[in-house]
Image: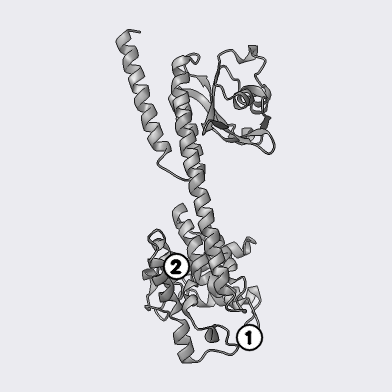
Amino acid sequence: MTQLKRIEEKTERLALLSRLGQILNSTLDPKEVRRRAMEAATQLMEAEVGSLLLIDEEKNQLYFEVALGNKEEAIKTMTLHMGEGIAGWVAKNGEPLIINAPEKDSRFFKGVDERTEFKTNNIICVPVKVKEKAIGVLEAMNKKGGGFDEEDLSLFTSLSDQVAIALDNARLYQELEEMFFQTAESLSDAIEKRDPYTGGHTQRVTAYSLATAKYLPLEPMEMKWLKISSVLHDIGKIGIDDQILRKTERLNSEEFNEIKRHTSMGAEIIDHIKQLRNIIPGVKYHHEQIDGTGYPEGLRGDKIPMIAKIVSVGDTFDAMTTDRPYRRALGKEMAINELRRCSGTQFDQNVVEAFIRAYQAGEI
């Protein structure tokens, strides 16, 4: 190979590394980051398979988070002790390794090959470090056309740095999401405590909504918005008089008109938080009905956002199956029959069907 050809190939691999780094850091979904890390490892190293192992500090073990190849499921059930095998050694010592004759290396752990009926001809393994601390290792096995070399190691180490950044960003984002969701739940609980007859309502509606959504074509981000919408769907009740919320008899028309304001009030509260504006449809429109007789705007059919349709069914089911001061709860089967009866008029047919599927699967 001429020097010019080598320079061209090195330039191409550096460009590939740059593109892979951009792809890795274009998502904050931890699962997607890990999947992309594996694809990047095998692509950059021109390897047959790859794997990402993460460290469980409490158990002092490594576990296969993701692995590429047709034996992924078998591999993901295995764990390694720190210091065990090539990956364990790299994790424990924080140093990379290239092993082009693994059968001659005492550190090589044959258990993975035996479990998967895979033959490791060569392996490159580097630590994944966040703030100088190893959180896992990145591996690529069986380079196509020969063994791994120092140039591979340099590129793979750079990729590992990108993986570490992407994993840490995803972790931080997930922690922020969890903290926000817990804050939203606490706020919702505080509102519920004003009404002694709806304890646990928010948690149940959230569970029903997420179970229903599994049987509908929602994108992952829509699932997140649905979850938060379900938790905060009654946030507007913070502006409703306690005497109305705590009333033990049926509401009169004036009182009902007052409580109906909670949907618009909730939307107004959420509108002040830029990052939450995508949940407004679920908060504002969860009392709309397919035939246009709902509130606050009397929307019909497809004009009602899908998230609101899902929350509506869960909200109504919970209302029917819990005791109120003025009536006893319905049994779940009776409530399901009522959803069927109102499907296509009060509720979206597809959402009702999805809800019933979740119920029949024991998820509700």
Total residue callouts: 2
> How packed is label 1: few (under 14 Cα within 10 Å), some, or many (20 or more)?
few
Does residue 38 sit above or below 109 in this rendering? below
Q: Decide: marks 1, 2 in contact (CB < 8 A)? A: no
348 vs 203, left or right, is: left
Q: Give the position of the C terminus as an image quadrant.
A: bottom right
Residue at the disc numbered 1: 325
Residue 283 location, quadrant:
bottom left
Q: Is residue 283 visible?
A: yes
Judging from the image, what secondary structure is the residue with disc 2 in? helix
Q: How many angstroms separate mark 1 from mark 2 (CA)?
A: 27 Å
Q: Which mark is residue 100?
A: none
- The disc labelled 1 sits on which kind of residue? Pro
- x%, y% of residue 38? 50, 32
Left or right position of 269 against 109: left
- x and y, in percent, of residue 142 in the image: 53, 20
Residue 52: where, in percent of width, then height?
A: 55, 32
Percent across and percent down for residue 174 are 51, 49
- Viewer-closest of 355 and 250: 250
Read off the residue under disc 2. Answer: 282
Residue pictured at 69% horizontal, 37% vertical = 59
In this orientation, does residue 69 appear? Answer: no
On the image, which quarter does residue 134 sit in?
top right
Asked which quadrant contains residue 305, the reply is bottom left
- Relative height, residue 348 to residue 179 (above, below): below
As displayed, is residue 75 above or below residue 296? Answer: above
Mark 2: few, some, or many residues within 10 Å (few <14, many ≥20)? many
Q: Residue at x 50, y 92 (%)?
A: 252
User: In percent of the image, x 37 and y 78: which residue is there?
Assistant: 297
Which of the marked residues, 1 or 2, is nearer the chain's N terminus?
2
Indicate the amino acid at tag 2. Gly
